[in-house]
Amino acid sequence: MSENMSVLADKVVSIDYELKLDDGQVVDQSQDEPLSYIHGKGMIISGLEDGISGMKIGESKEVVVEPGEGYGEYNEEEINALPREAFPEGMEIKVGDHLRVKEQDTGRVHQVRVLEIQPETVTLDFNHPLAGKTLYFNIKVVDVRDATEEELEHGHIH
Ligand code: ZN
């Protein structure tokens, strides 16, 4: 392992991280294993990728990411009312529930939050749960190595 390896495009980077919101609440963190990704490929949010660029193995840093470079601005147009019959009969739905909804045409699955329940409709928030939030990452770079040809071709880590 080279001690001087720094984070550049096409390196496989492993980080320990903790993600907090401005109220100090921890909403995500690396588990038993560090998170590994190929740098410069948009595999992580752009603000975090920019913040990690140039860091060296063993270095720690706080990276603050504004919504525009994180999970996007909160968009009122992402709030949609669906007819009650779009949900399976007998399914219990409460305000605040997180549901997985599949788009009929594309098959894409969204995580949505129930905002309101009316007799005929259910109002859902399709925004990412972290949309509109400023993100405070504590990052430690655990390892940096060259990606193999195959990893670069496949766009993921082996
Ligand atoms: Zn592969």
Image: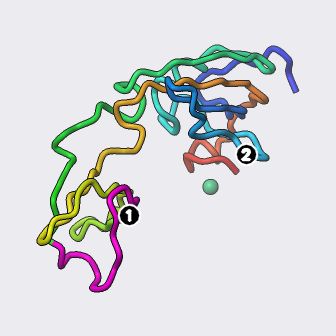
Helix, strand or loop status at disc 1 = strand
Residue 97's x, y, as percent?
39, 60
Query: Which residues, given as a range, are shown in magenta?
Result: 84-100
Picture quadrant of residue 131:
top left
Residue appearing at x 70%, y 32% in the figure: 15
Q: Earlier in the sequence, mark 1 or mark 2?
A: 2
The answer to whether the residues at label 1 and label 2 have Cβ atoms under 8 Å apart is no
Instruction: Please name the residue that numbered disc 2 is placed on.
Output: 31
Tag 1: Cα neighbours inside 10 Å, few (<14), some, or many (≥20)? some
Query: Quarter for ligand 1?
Result: bottom right
> Please, which residue is most extreme toward the left here?
120
In the picture, measured across the screen, residue 74 lies left or right of residue 131, that is left
- Magenta region includes residue 154: no
Q: Which residue is mark 1?
A: 99
Q: Main secondary structure of the magenta part?
A: loop
- Confirm or reject: label 1 Cβ below 8 Å from ligand 1: no
Mark 2 neighbour class, 10 Å CA radius: few under 14, some 14 to 19, many 20 or more: few
Check the image and report above or below for 9 versus 27. Answer: above
Q: Nearer the viewer, residue 124 or 57?
A: 124
Gap between marks 1 and 2 measured at Cα? 24 Å
